[in-house]
Image (spheres, rainbow, N blue to C red):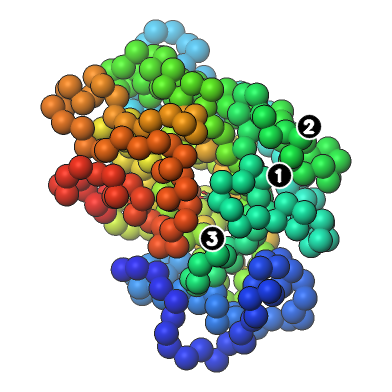
Amino acid sequence: MALTISSSPSPSVSMGLIEQKKGVKHLVDNSKDMKMLPAEFILALPEAERPSLAIHGSIPVIDLSGLNGSIEQRLSTIHAISSACAEWGFFRVTNHGIKSCMMDEMVKVIEEFFRLPLEEKMRYGSEDVMDAVRYGTSLNTTRKHALHWRDFLRHYGGPVPHSYHLWPDNPSNYRDIAKEYLKEVWQLAVKIFGAISEGLGLDPNYIERSIGEGTQIIAANYFPPCPEPNKTLGLAAHSDHGGLTILMDNGIHGLQIKHNQTWFAVPHVPGTFVVNLGDYLEILSNGRYKSVEHRAVVNAEKTRISVAVGHGPEMDAIVQPADPLIKEMSESKYRPIVYKDYIRGQQSTIERRKSALHEIMTSSDNNIDD
Ligand SMILES: O=C(O)CCC(=O)C(=O)O
Ligand SMILES: [Fe+2]
């Protein structure tokens, strides 16, 4: 069922448009002892999809040190990654080579950014989904929809971050820390892309070659405590547009993933990353792997921060299934599309889920609800 703006009368208070655009941190900071969720945030979620009903589960855990081990270890790690991609589309990585202190430092500087006065953050305010740097709130404030309980900072990274000079210069160490973090995360993504290529029976460099210079986008999400967390979401169900997202948070639970039509809560495990497949890999694998819907739930007590970094092809690349996989399956299950057009379309939806991907599927027998 679609998420729609609740039509039932709500006893909650209501906010003006200007106030809405100031975001949820500002709202919470300026409302003493808020007990009720403002009506604009109430999401009409089907009963079975209530955040509190998610099952506590565990996703596959991949020890990446296996990729540098003996031939047997390497093959068994690649096999474990392929199975995780086919069965879950989500896995946790350990021994990934990024130091915990760097992860902590990144979360800390993001937290400092969100703690800046509103005017300072608004220097990066943008409603254009393609802008290189954007501070904002909810999902898409240019269109009327039930608001999401999150503020965000998004910007491009990449091995050579062309937009570096546009990134926040306050906190003063933000650029240095983010640059270093994004560089390491990029290398990690390339390593996993290599294993996924091999698992798909492709040349080990196939995906790396396909993404070329690539596109890396960081989305730092800030979810303050919410007065009625079961009535809204920090981020509603969506799949990511890129190939791989590498995600961490500040230790506060909130990520849920849809697996076999059931929402699973994914716990925080210190020092690890959660990796998920996005639409680009579903397309490239010609549907062998599916991007997975996930969402962020909020809680009444603690602020949650998550840092998601997506990795996809160059903006002007034409996204389509890998040739060898089209030949193997005797059909192409997705229509070619320029990646930036795909992103623009996906980011402009308000009922996100996997709607953008469904638009480019060539046959209706693709499992719509996977
Ligand atoms: O907050 C989370 O755990 C998920 C964030 C996410 O899915 C995103 O930014 O795309
Ligand atoms: Fe996501």
Element under disc 3: loop
- On residue 107, the disc is 1
Q: Position of residue 102 (x, y in %)?
A: 72, 33
The amino acid type, in three-letter code, at marker 2 is: Asp
Residue denoted by label 2: 176
Asked whether mark 1 lies closer than 8 Å to ligand 1, one says no
Q: Residue furthest right?
A: 172
Image position of 300 (left or right of 175): left
Residue denoted by label 3: 139
Asked whether mark 2 lies closer than 8 Å to ligand 1, one says no
The amino acid type, in three-letter code, at marker 3 is: Leu
Image position of 303 (left or right of 171): left
The quarter of the picture where residue 226 lies is bottom right
Task: Please say if 27 is above or below 237.
Answer: below
Among the two numbered marks 3 and 2 on one chain, the one whose residue lies closer to the N terminus = 3
Q: Residue furthest top?
A: 71
Residue at 24%, 52% (x, y): give it.
368
Residue at 54%, 61% (x, y): give it.
140
